[in-house]
Amino acid sequence: MKFIKDSAIVVTGRDLGESDMLITFITREHGKMKAVAKGARRSRKRFLNALEPCTLLDFRIVPSRSSGLGRLDSVEVSENYPAIRSSAKCFMFASLCCELSDLWIHENDQAPELFKLFQWYLESIDKNSTNALRHTLAFKTRLLALAGYRQAWDRCVICGINPRGSKVGFGIDQGGCVCSSCGAEGMLLKDVSTGTLRSLAYLDSSGLPALDRLKMTRASMKEAWQLLSALHRHLLQRTPKSYNVLDSTLLPELNPS
Amino acid sequence: MPSAFPPALERLIKNFSKLPGIGEKSATRLALQVLRWPEGQAAEFAESIAVLHSRIRLCSSCHTFSEQDPCPVCADPRRDASKICVVEDPGDLLAMEKAGAFNGLYHVLHGVLAPMDGIGPDQLKLKELMQRVEQRGGEVEVIIATSSTAAGEATASFLSDMLAEKGVRTSRIACGIPMGMDLKYADKMTLQRALEARIKY
């Protein structure tokens, strides 16, 4: 029998029928994959707490003979990030990243960079929950780039120069900041501080281990969160459900006043 | 194409197939079975469904399903009111009651944190729990008995932070090796948790 073997991060698990589950993974080599875990709800013995979101595992899938869903044959947990589970804040941030990954990546699209980013993200917030907000900002920034929507954070998206002044207009439709000389009537620009945009540029392009060197003020993180949320909502043409929960509970101080 | 069944039977099949795990074939089998019953038995079955919503409500104290308010557990003066066990849903409360190992009161959250499904703290009965605790002047032990799933653990952490702010004594049910299980078949995380929660022997 032919199997698909790979490493993956569980993104979602949904009930399917009476006793099965439909699991969505971000895999190392096969992109986003879905598979049916037969009997996963009836008996926990076979998949024993492996199918929870944010679990890193090695799996074996029996591909479908037709074009349907494959069947999950076996899994072995490599890491289940216990610190994320034991912090409501980290769990909510990680849930948002799971949902965004699921929404942004199409099934069977190759996404090795996303797998690497996701693994780094889970490891980093599992090790140090104080970085959770900043690392979630980095994840959201880089996810946009991986999906093909890299933003021009610190140069004008039209003329390419670095805008001056403490605040710059950011065009959600344009995909970057727009300097005062390029800004035209009818453009919907959001005023963002240049410091925040520089921080977002750093989060987008620096090496992952260097992210901890970035210092961001609370106000700057708030502004960055709002801008990234607006971009994800606009580009996805929908509001991920996790945003509703995060906006109303964990991040009231980051909401627009 | 017109249905082979009379409209009344067709309606019952449609309603049965709304139940979880019941497809059209099973719904047809169940509907035909009801049709074979004596009229009185079928009427009793229909009445038991009809009165469900009018009779059963949430207990205003613990929020479990009950025909009385307060529910029999909350109304029982022999229960230890200084202990509140927080569970995810009424099914968990029943499991705890069946075990017979707990003599305190309960609080049903009606779910756990599930941001991907849009369920946050506001959707759970957390404010109601805080009110209960405040009514007792904080003189209560809250035992968090949510499942040891990722969502259950995160909910327990959220709840524990909320209660710690109020200075309420909080504990978490233990997690580890189930009775009768061979140790070599336990997974890594369960073994870690079992060792962490070890007790003096």
Image (cartoon, rainbow, N blue to C red):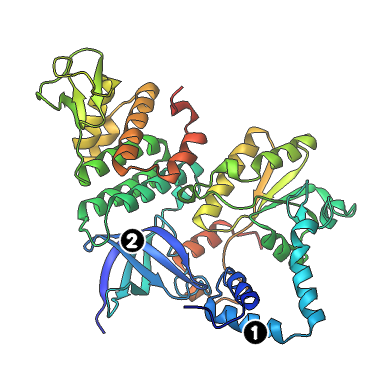
Q: Quadrant of the N terminus of chain A?
A: bottom left
A156 relative position to A86: left or right? left
Can you identify the residue that label 2 sits on?
A25
Residue A145, compared with residue A255, is above or below; it is below
A15 relative position to B15: left or right? left
Disc 2 sits on a residue from what chain? Answer: A
Question: Label 1's element?
Answer: helix
Disc 1 sits on a residue from what chain? Answer: B
- Which residue shows up at 78% across the image and 46% down it? B60
User: Which quadrant of the view contains residue B5?
Assistant: bottom right
1 and 2 marks on the same chain: no
Q: How many marks?
A: 2
- Which residue shows up at 66% across the image and 45% down it? B125
Whole-number angstrom distance, CA of label 1 to CA of label 2: 42 Å
Question: Which amino acid type is shown beneath numbered disc 1?
Answer: Leu
- On the image, the x and y values in percent for residue B17 come to 57, 72
Residue A186, compared with residue A174, is above or below; it is above
- On the image, the x and y values in percent for residue B30 come to 63, 81
Query: B162 or A178, which is in the foreground?
Result: A178
Query: Farthest residue in the bottom direction?
Result: B36
Can you identify the residue that label 1 sits on?
B32
- On the image, the x and y values in percent for residue A107 come to 27, 60
- Which residue shows up at 62% across the image and 58% down it? B174
Query: A171 or A63, which is in the foreground?
Result: A171
Question: Label 2's element?
Answer: strand
Q: Nearer the viewer, mark 1 or mark 2?
A: 1
Question: Which amino acid type is shown beneath numbered disc 2?
Answer: Phe
Q: Residues within 10 Å of mark 1 (few under 14, many from 20)?
A: some
User: Which quadrant of the view contains residue B12?
Assistant: bottom right
Q: Residues within 10 Å of mark 2 (few under 14, many from 20)?
A: many
Query: Farthest residue in the top direction?
Result: A165
Query: A41 or A75, which is in the foreground?
Result: A41
